[in-house]
Amino acid sequence: MFNPGYYNDEDMLGGGMYPRSLLHRAAGGAPRRFDEYYRCYPVVMLPGPERENVNHGGKVILPPSALDKLSRLHITYPMMFELINGAAEKFTHAGVLEFIAEEGKIYLPYWLMQTLSLDPGDLLQVLSTDLPPGTFIKLQAQSMSFTEISDPKAVLENAFRNFSCLTTGDVFTFAYNDQIYEMAVQETKPGNAKGGAISVVETDLEVDFAAPVGYEEPKRVSGTSTPASGRGLPAGGMLHSAGTMAQAINYDSIAPQSNAAAAGAKAVSSNFLSGGHKLKGSKAPTPKASTPVAGASTNPPQQPVVSRSRTNGPQPLRLPPGKLFFGYEIKPVKKKGEEDKENEDTEKPHFQGQGQSLRGGVKRKGNDAD
């Protein structure tokens, strides 16, 4: 379970009370690393209730003996480890969540076992390490479903609580709304550690996103749309490409003046459009009786109805794209003084002066004679 010579390295020096590792560190030497081998298993095989948050995080579960040795080596929080699969020559980094595994076993999230190409029961080397705090990370979603998340920043901030470190090339998973999302780590900064690993604990991390896998750029339509030509326009005005607004909308045809409308009504909209007939000195022709013919209809043939378009009334307003119509006649609003003056004029009597009676004013001739 432990490396050979584990207790030999930590034996008492000459019957003293301090181990050699502590004396070596006190003398100014570099601190020793935690280095152990364990049989790896996925988190779903951990005894007890299912722990979904552990399976979609970046932390492992070690046995209690690992905590004892880490304490002896004075490895402080946050504890981070380099996981090495020597058989496949692959490595990555992870943190530790708890020390409750059986002795000689380590439990990993399933995505870590896929990254390291591990099968349950394979031997895994675990080394303690120190990683720099990350300042930048570039991620790529492995499916287009990630684009449907309304607030990806808040979702990732919550997901990173289950991680201690990340390595370039990792494809980690996180759960959101009963759905599993995969995210690939494409780039990290500062990136001076092995494999570009960084710590995501208590750091201000800038996150950038690459285009998700399967994303296609929308096709851009070149050129600008041009208005349709004036061919085939119904009656009621033609479109003009230049000139004033009245010319552009053919104001005379779509909104004629009152006198033009009256003239058009008199000339076109007359109820008597047929020719006149004189009644004086003319006799109406007597209708001749027609002999019915077999197979022929006695009803007179119906004349085709000719529809006449109205040209004297308001016509439909048809404007080219991008133009507005402000052509209606403006009737100025009368001021209060003008309205009062008109009211006074209407209230004045039209016939003024004193009335004179003709009765008794002129004496009759009979009275003069008397």
Image: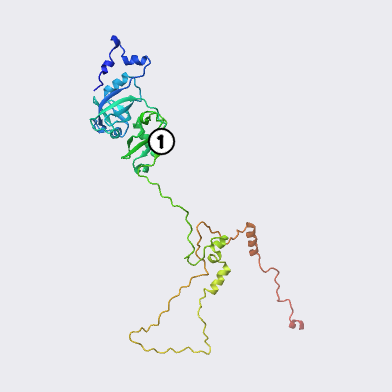
For the C terminus, the quadrant is: bottom right
- Using the image, determine if residue 278 lies above or below residue 72: below
Q: Is residue 154 or residue 114 the one in the foreground? A: 114
Q: How many marks?
A: 1
Give the image location of residue 100, x and y in percent.
26, 26
- Using the image, determine if residue 242 lies above or below residue 90: below
- Using the image, determine if residue 279 lies above or below residue 139: below
The colour scheme applied to this rendered structure is: rainbow
* Identity, as a three-letter code, of the amino acid under mark 1: Val
Which image quadrant is residue 331 in? bottom right
Q: Badge 1: few (under 14), some or many (20 or more) residues near its Cα, within 10 Å?
A: few
Give the image location of residue 37, x and y in percent.
26, 25
For the N terminus, the quadrant is: top left
Q: Secondary structure beneath disc 1?
A: strand
In the picture, measured across the screen, residue 296 lies left or right of residue 222, that is left
Give the image location of residue 345, x and y in percent.
65, 63
- Using the image, determine if residue 128 lies above or below residue 109: above
Visible residue check, residue 9: yes
Q: Is residue 313 or residue 33 the one in the foreground? A: 33
Give the image location of residue 248, x and y in percent.
55, 61
Which image quadrant is residue 61 in? top left
Q: Residue furthest right?
A: 369
Visible residue check, residue 370: no
In the picture, measured across the screen, residue 66 lies left or right of residue 28, that is left
- Residue drawn where x is 56% and y is 63% of the image: 247
Disc 1 designates what residue? 207
Q: Is residue 179 or residue 87 the one in the foreground? A: 87
In the picture, measured across the screen, residue 347 lies left or right of residue 213, that is right
